[in-house]
Image (cartoon, rainbow, N blue to C red):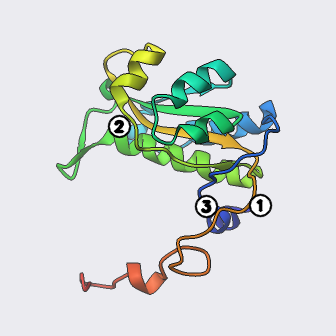
Amino acid sequence: MDLLEAIQQTKPCRLFKTAQVPDEKLTKVLNAARLAPSIDDRQPWRFLVVRDEGTKVKLSQLLSKGALVRAAPVVIIALASEGESPSLVGGVVMSHLLDVAVSIENMVLAATAEGLGTFWISDFNADKISRFFGIPEGFQVVGILPIGFPGPETPTNGKSPNGRKSLAEVTAYERFNW
């Protein structure tokens, strides 16, 4: 599958089959994250991989979307190292958070290309997750990605046949005109 196909086919996966994710596929997903671009090539990311059922059950109890974590064969927790990329982007957001977001998107696209599904969980209490996994100060949890073979189709949000806004709704030329 080429990149544009992966982009077009990517959608949140909320149902997973029970089949395990082969190591080769997981490695490709993690490598895609590792190879993401970052500001000044600082690569401020770390990825905590969780496969143990007991750990996933305990993690799921800390999340409002815990059922996704319990159902997925693999969960990846994406972390940002604050000290490795301390610059502000546009005076608004720390670059290490954006860098990790880019690496997460690479994982989402690689998962799709490998026939896997995932869902970026962003609704969590970072302090609870950090305490549970022993994540030290200076690292921030940016996202939690349950990954597995997709189950039955997840309905779209109804905005268009594939659930996405049209290009005309999100694009302006030369001036802001919304």
- In this orientation, which residue lies closer to the viewer: 61 or 174? 61
Instruction: Classify mark 1: residues with Cα within 10 Å, few (<14), some (14-19) or many (20+).
Output: few
Q: Where does residue 51 sit, x and y in percent of width and height?
A: 68, 25
Q: Where does residue 158 sit, x and y in percent of width and height?
A: 54, 77
In the image, which is nearer the foreground, mark 1 or mark 3?
A: 3
In the image, which is nearer the foreground, mark 2 or mark 3?
A: 3
Give the label on residue 143, or none.
none
Disc 2 residue type (three-letter): His
The answer for how far apart the CA atoms under marks 2 and 1 are is 30 Å
- Residue at point 73%, 49% (across, down): 116
- In this orientation, which residue lies closer to the viewer: 164 or 39? 164
Residue marked by disc 2: 96
Instruction: Classify mark 2: residues with Cα within 10 Å, few (<14), some (14-19) or many (20+).
Output: many
- Residue at point 31%, 17% (across, down): 137
Residue marked by disc 1: 1
Disc 3 residue type (three-letter): Lys
Disc 1 residue type (three-letter): Met
Q: Where does residue 133 sit, x and y in percent of width and height?
A: 48, 17
Residue marked by disc 3: 11
In which quadrant is the N terminus drawn?
bottom right
Q: Secondary structure at mark 3?
A: loop
Q: Secondary structure at mark 2?
A: helix
Q: Quadrant of residue 71?
A: top right
